[in-house]
């Protein structure tokens, strides 16, 4: 499953739910949390369940849209009801907001083990993607996800909005548009911890959805930094993110040349192409660009 663009859709918006399957998003996240007002929580979870039942996994043009649900946080009264409502629709995974650390994943995982068989699903089949930076305490303990036993953990992602409210930050970016230190720290830890574990790192959303240029810059930087994909909030962001996370023809050609060079010289540790030194890390990166990781 491609994981470049993860498009949020508010679970209580019939209009947006109708639209989302027609986008080129790699993954849709039906949101039951922050984009849904308290009075609409029950309606949203029922609508999300209906959407999942009506949009069974299907392969179009060789790819299948991922179907995920963001439930409410574990300190709410909503999250168990959310799971009960959406599991019969067999989502690929659950996004967990305000995750406090590995113990939150374990708590959610235990509930999923109870509910999966009742929904006719294989035990352990539902994956989890936590938002790891939404409180200050969570943001300073991101590395704890690196080695805990968390078989359902599919990746890590982070968010700036809740963290800025939590720490009273009146800005998230500096005058050049770069994340300020607290946010950069959370982003970097998310990236490195995900790689330390060998799972995907998903970068946070670009909130200004009319700012195509800024989004392109952010998405290209995210891919160049080692993220596998990025969150989105508006259908217009999807094509920009998908393009930024797809290797260019030049990159593909270079990666093929590196892989071919090592395949023809299997005993070589270091080679040269066009007077440039290439060694094993280049080979590894080239395989990754070609989607051929060993
Ligand atoms: N998913 C599916 N369709 C969406 C969408 C989304 N996330 N966001 C907008 N659309 C639809 C709109 O309904 C509109 O449809 P129409 O052309 O049939 O009228 C079209 O795309 C263009 O939308 P636009 O008018 O530019 O935006 P808007 O004012 O309707 O909505 C937001 C702006 C930010 C409220 C909206 O994009 C949104 O709800 N995003 C998701 C928010 C969310 O889930 N947040 C949680 C994560 S932080
Ligand atoms: Mg939030």
Image: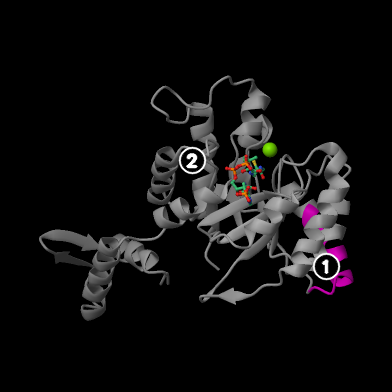
Circle 2 crowding by C-alpha within 10 Å: few under 14, some 14–19, many from 20: some
Percent position of residue 241, x then y: 46, 52
1 or 2: mark nearer the eye: 1
178 or 24: nearer the eye?
A: 24
Question: What main secondary structure does the magenta stretch of the protein show?
Answer: helix
Question: Which corner quadrant holds the C terminus?
Answer: bottom left
Question: Can you see residue 230?
Answer: no
Left or right of 235, for residue 94 = right
Q: Which residue is drawn at 35% across and 65% down?
A: 284
Residue that sits furthest to the left in the current view: 275
Split into quadrants, the picture shows ligand 1 in the one at: top right
294 or 134: nearer the eye?
A: 134
Instruction: Tell me: residue 197, above or below residue 190.
Output: below
Query: Residue 88's mark?
Result: 1
Q: Is the shortest distance between ligand 1 and the CB of mark 1 under 8 Å?
A: no
Instruction: Tell me: residue 284, above or below residue 261.
Output: above
Residue 177 occupies quadrant: top left
231 or 260: nearer the eye?
A: 231
Percent position of residue 217, x then y: 39, 42
Tell me which segment is drawn in magenta. Answer: 108-121
284 or 210: nearer the eye?
A: 210
Q: Which residue is drawn at 81% across and 61% down?
A: 49
Return the residue at label 2: 188
Left or right of 245, for residue 254 = left
**Element marked by disc 2:** helix
**Element marked by disc 1:** helix
Percent position of residue 229, x then y: 50, 54
Q: Which residue is drawn at 84% across and 74% down?
A: 120
Query: Residue 41's mark?
Result: none
Label whose residue precedes the other's in the sequence (1 or 2): 1
């Amino acid at each position: 499953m491609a994981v470049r663009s993860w498009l949020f859709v508010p679970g209580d918006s019939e209009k947006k739910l109708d639209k989302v399957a027609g986008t080129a998003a790699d993954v849709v996240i039906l949101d039951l949390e922050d984009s849904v007002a308290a009075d609409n929580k029950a309606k949203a979870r029922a609508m999300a369940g209906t959407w999942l039942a009506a949009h069974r996994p299907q392969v179009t043009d060789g790819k299948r849209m991922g179907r995920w649900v963001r439930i409410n946080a574990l300190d709410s009264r909503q999250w168990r009801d959310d799971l009960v409502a959406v599991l019969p629709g067999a989502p690929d995974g659950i996004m967990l907001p305000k995750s406090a650390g590995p113990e939150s994943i374990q708590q959610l995982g235990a509930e999923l083990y109870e509910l999966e068989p009742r929904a006719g699903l294989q035990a352990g089949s539902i994956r989890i993607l936590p938002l790891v930076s939404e409180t200050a305490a969570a943001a300073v303990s991101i590395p704890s996800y690196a080695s805990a036993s968390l078989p359902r953990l599919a990746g890590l992602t982070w968010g700036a909005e809740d963290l800025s409210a939590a720490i009273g930050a009146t800005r998230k970016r500096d005058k050049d548009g770069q994340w300020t230190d607290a946010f950069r720290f959370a982003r970097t830890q998310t990236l490195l911890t995900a790689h330390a574990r060998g799972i995907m790192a998903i970068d946070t959303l670009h909130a200004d959805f009319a700012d195509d240029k800024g989004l392109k810059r952010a998405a290209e930087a995210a891919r160049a930094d080692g993220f596998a994909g990025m969150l989105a909030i508006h259908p217009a962001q999807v094509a920009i993110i998908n393009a930024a996370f797809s290797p260019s023809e030049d990159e593909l050609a270079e990666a093929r040349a590196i892989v071919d060079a090592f395949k023809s010289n299997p005993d070589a540790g270091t080679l040269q192409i066009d007077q440039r030194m290439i060694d094993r890390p280049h080979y590894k990166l080239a395989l990754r660009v070609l989607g051929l990781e060993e």
